[in-house]
Image: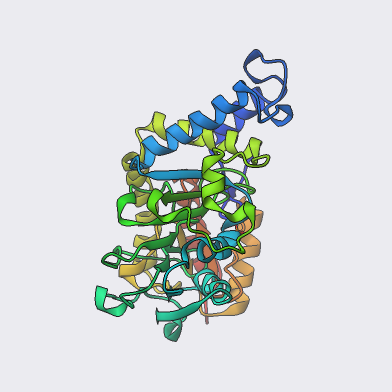
Amino acid sequence: MRVYNFSAGPSMLPLSVLEKAASEMTNYRSSGISVMEMSHRTPLYESILNKAEADLRTLMAIPDNYKVLFLQGGASTQFAAVPMNLLNGSGKADYVVTGQFSKKAMQEAAKYGDIRKVASSEDKNNTYIPRLTKEDFRPDADYVHICFNNTIYGTKWDYIPDTGDIPLVADLSSCILSEPVDVSKFGLIYAGAQKNMAPAGLTIVIVREDLIGKARPETPAMFDYKLLADNNSMYNTPPCYCIYMAGLVYEWLLEMGGLSVMAEKNRKKAALLYDYLDSQSYYTAPAEASARSLMNVTFVTGNADLDKLFAKEAEKSGLCSLKGHRSVGGMRASIYNAMPYDGVVALVEFMKAFADNNPKN
Ligand SMILES: *Cc1c(COP(=O)(O)O)cnc(C)c1O
């Protein structure tokens, strides 16, 4: 039996994608070999990579003046690659801290230049998104960095901050492909694949062409966007199988009707859970309503022992990995694209029964 996996990542993949991959595992489309065994320098593999890129461009309506890179190293590697490539003018960059990942990104960038924390939501344990205007940013900053969906805290930016002419860089690891986003508003988007796209091991970078080619001299070749782009993401061996899996996920999304259809499904799933949370008092949802994530839903009972029991009993009912991040406690339900609506129905039913069976005196 397959369980409902609410893990923040690696997370669920669509069953039909897994089945397709399984059916092609040992002999990819009559080629006689597995994608895992295929040289990346073959026309057959190049067709897999090129189709994945073309489909991602279609899904996200990525403008022609953006490069798409398929890389390794996770989103965390981009915490360093971004400043190495973009911190090349004034040497200043502005960071907004709305959780642990944006904080880590800022700390990494601080090794390379004059990094300022523009605003943060740390004063309220990252339960909200700061309201910012163009005037909040240093006009000579090389870029502004945000984390668009805060995986640990269950918050998401409900607006794209206006940074004027300063390129906006965003970590979209936990919300990419969950709904349409206007790529042209960003100078650079990066995302680890293991939340909403593919198995762990692949990282996507979408970068405006005019921002590349000016990497700092000490930048390792493997971090240099220009070199990676000029080599069609194959400066070295790319994460071949993950790219193939991502390609299957892109096909799944296209067949469904694209990101507006996916967004509709995601809103329906999230609403089911948030509406229940708002309707009762046993559980509380710490994230401010305007900042609620569609992908990661955090909630607590207010009693650490009950929280622990909740996660343990849920696991026995086939509702897995609901324990919240240690910095927030409580529970976190990650309901990424591949989580079926029925999984959220099952979770809400479980929450109701748990509340009935475990009164708080
Ligand atoms: C998971 C996650 C990361 C870390 O990703 P790795 O691929 O493990 O480096 C960074 N940012 C966000 C928003 C995440 O959700």
Name the spot of residue 6 as percent of width and height, x first.
56, 54
**Left or right of residue 74: residue 55:** left
Is residue 317 at all visible to an observer of this figure?
no
Residue placed most toward the observer, 249 or 338: 249
Q: Residue at x 61, y 39 (%)?
A: 234
Q: Quadrant of ligand 1?
A: bottom right
Name the image colouring.
rainbow
Q: List the single residue furthest toward the bottom.
A: 123
Q: Quadrant of the N terminus?
A: top right
Q: Residue at x 43, y 33 (%)?
A: 55
Q: List the single residue furthest toward the front.
A: 217
Name the spot of residue 274 as percent of width and height, x first.
37, 62
The mark tally for this picture is: 0
Name the spot of residue 189 as percent of width and height, x first.
43, 55
Residue placed most toward the observer, 81 or 224: 224
Asked where in the image residue 20 lies, by quadrant, the reply is top right
Q: Residue at x 56, y 58 (%)?
A: 75
Q: Residue at x 40, y 74 (%)?
A: 281
Residue placed most toward the observer, 145 or 312: 145
Asked where in the image residue 43 lies, by quadrant, the reply is top right
Name the spot of residue 289 as percent of width and height, x first.
32, 70
Compared with 252, 208 (above or below) is below
Compared with 109, 22 (above or below) is above
Is residue 65 at all visible to an observer of this figure?
yes
Residue placed most toward the observer, 240 or 91: 91
Compared with 99, 204 (above or below) is above
